[in-house]
Image: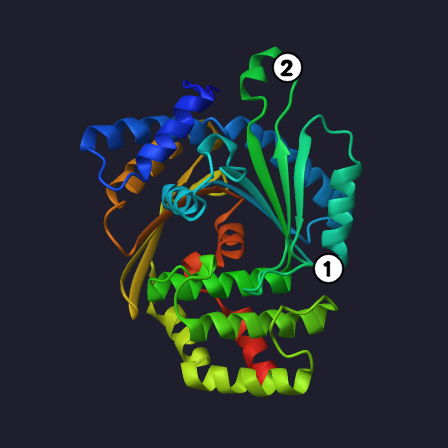
Amino acid sequence: MVWTVPKHTRSQVNAAGTALISPSPSPDAVRRALGVVNNWRASHSVPLNAIRANLRDHVVAECGDEALIARRLKRLSSIEAKLRRSHHMQLARMQDIGGCRAVLPSIDSVRSVVRRFEKSRTKHELLRRYDYMTQPRASGYRGVHLAYGYQTEFEKNTVYNGMRIEVQLRSRLQHAWATAVETVGTFSGQALKSSEGSEDWLRLFALMGTEFAFQEGLPLVPETPGDRGPLRRELARSIMDLDAVARLEAYGRALKVLEGNVRNGRAAYFHIYLERSDENSASVRWNEYSENEREEAIHAYEEVESAIRHFPGGETVLVQVSSIDALQRAYPNYFADTSVFVAALRQATG
């Protein structure tokens, strides 16, 4: 199997990132920048594959088959948005071009897998640890992120040394929260995931972050009620003002799932394309690729991603999971599945 190798220096990668977000780039400059960025991103497949294998070993040892594991290359739109938000960010140092995610049964299992990772004898360098479980973001987001620098002595792969991969670990409740944020952001056309957009929705998610913190025994989200009585009263008002339950359920009904190619369990990569016509209408389709078709999958992903760059309402992602069922559980926001979050809303105000 042939793997993509980096063709450009890190200085050239950084320059391409700068060109990508230039206020008025020429078409030729954009085309050249996209070529560099896409090669740099695709080159992360080898480090991502290696670190995902380590993650799977630790997760299986701790949880058996109870956890869900997925990996993905960062979307071009997300790369651009991050470069715009972080003015000093250099593309070659962006830590989550390649990312692995594990959704674990509980807080204890998240902590245990983190300990296993940090005590392991892996050659990969742990660059930074972000503990958003004990220090939640003001948005309410929780999880643990481990940023690794890929390292190998295998001569064929030393060209990838230093490439950065991010491991995300979440509990099921934390995953339900993040799913709801992304779903509302997708259907409303707002960057809620980046704490941009409707202040009312952002407040609701901060409040639910604290509600989940009470359930999981974690520190509360800053600037939210520290007592459950006032918290639930404010939650009830927020849910009513937004008509949140009805709207989240409507998103699920609005989504028309279109059948993709079926490989009878032989798929390794899933290329998803979601198109939102308006807040009341969306469709999602996917194509499946076998392990041997990885380069074909990446090429198809890049073509669609390039085509939708300037058209609002379209989203695409390429992920590796074991099945359609695992895909829907790992990325429920693409299928508008907020059932866990809606049930939590009802319970918190029932």
Percent of width and height locating residue 173 = 62, 65
Residue 16, horizontal then vertical, whole percent: 35, 29
In terms of sequence position, does the residue under pointer 2 or pointer 1 come before the other? 1
- Give the camera-side residue of 327 and 188: 188
Looking at the picture, tell me which residue is in the foreground, 78 or 108: 78
Which image quarter holds the C terminus? bottom right
Q: Is residue 92 visible?
A: yes
Residue 154, numbered circle: 2
Residue type, mark 1 in image: Ile
Q: Residue furthest front?
A: 88
Of helix, strand and loop, which one carries label 1? helix
Residue 120 sits in which quadrant? top right
State whether residue 220 is above or below residue 349: above
Report which residue position mark 1 lands on.
107
At x 67%, y 28%, the residue is 124
Label 2 to label 1, Cα distance in Å? 36 Å
Q: Amino acid at mark 2?
A: Phe
Taking 155 as reference, is 271 above or below it? Answer: below
Residue 266 x/y as whole percent: 49, 38
Q: How many numbered marks does the figure carry?
A: 2
Give the crowd class for mark 2: few <14, some 14-19, many >=20 residues within 10 Å. few
Q: Residue at x 26, y 42 (%)?
A: 23
Q: Is residue 108 left or right of residue 103?
A: right
The type of colouring in the image is rainbow
Eyeballing the image, is 223 above or below 239? above
Q: Quadrant of residue 125?
A: top right
| Observer able to see residue 272 | no
SS for tag 2?
loop
